Amino acid sequence: MKTLAKLVMVLAVLALCLPAYGDVLVYKISIKASGFDINAGEAGKVKARGYLVVDFDLTVLADMQSGDSEELDAELVLYGKEGGYKWRKTVVVDTFDITFVEVGNRSKPHTVAEMEVDVREGTVVAILAGPDKSTDIGLSRKYYVPAGLKGSALVSGDSYMGSGKISVKLDSTATKDANLYLGGDSDDTVEGLEDYLQDKGHEPI
């Protein structure tokens, strides 16, 4: 009995000492909108692309039932080129809420996501949706995760108002690398993407 008690105590101490990482999904994201530059009095377009890094606990995702919602932490690593200048910018996503939905008689899993994030032109508010697929994301087994999300967005800022589309597609290679080699640490994943873009000549703004 004393040996068992000692073993339990040792395991508890080890659990406290181990890093508490979650799991990471990395998506490629594209934002396209058209609208008006109010100050300039002319039409204008917003185009942005980059990576969406979503931090979550897969055990929570696996237990979600139809209609369940979960608020997740996420960051955007955006990049582009204006003239001869290559830029990149990392921003924290203010809101990334997902709702699990089973669709049709065969209960096909889908995810609906609400996203709000500030970009250079203003605040982007979007509703996205797409099917879940059984996917290898670098963990012990496959999980049903959102493979791709698409939807509409509104963009509003001090001098810009417009609307457009957002598409998000799972980057399976980056996702597996993040979970296999970075322990599912979202901060390290974001830093790795920043370094990758830096090597491509994209300077931070």
Image (cartoon, rainbow, N blue to C red):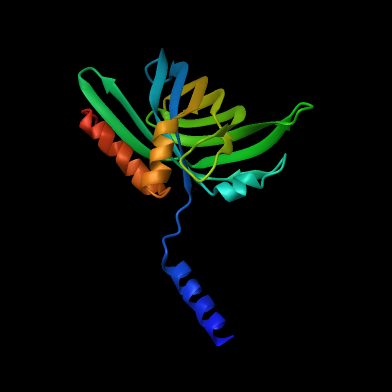
Horizontal and vertical percent for residue 30? 44, 23
Q: Reply above or below: 43 against 18.
A: above
Can residue 204 be seen here? no
x and y percentages locating residue 46 in the rendered image: 41, 20
Q: How many marks?
A: 0
Give the residue drawn at x 36%, y 46%. 181
- Say if 19 sits above or below 119 in the image: below
For the residue pair 138 and 64, the one nearer the viewer reads as 138
Q: Is residue 185 left or right of residue 166?
A: left
201, 204: nearer the viewer: 201
Res 127 → quadrant: top right
Q: Tell me where residue 102 sits by quadrant.
A: top right
Point 49% across, 26% down: residue:
169
Q: Nearer the viewer, residue 89 or 41?
A: 89
Question: In the image, 119: left or right of 134?
Answer: left
User: Residue 67 location in percent, x, y?
Assistant: 72, 40
Quarter of the N terminus within the rendering = bottom right
Residue at horizontal 71%, vertical 43%?
A: 65
Relative side of 63 to 55, left or right: right
| Quadrant in which the C terminus is drawn | top left
Picture quadrant where residue 108 is located: top right
Q: Residue at the spot x=36%, y=43% of the render?
A: 189
- In the picture as drawn, the residue positioned furthest to the bottom comes out as 2
Outermost residue, right side: 105
Question: Residue 52: where, in percent of width, then height?
Answer: 44, 35
Between 164 and 9, the residue placed more toward the observer is 9
Q: Does any portion of residue 123 appear in the rendered image?
A: yes
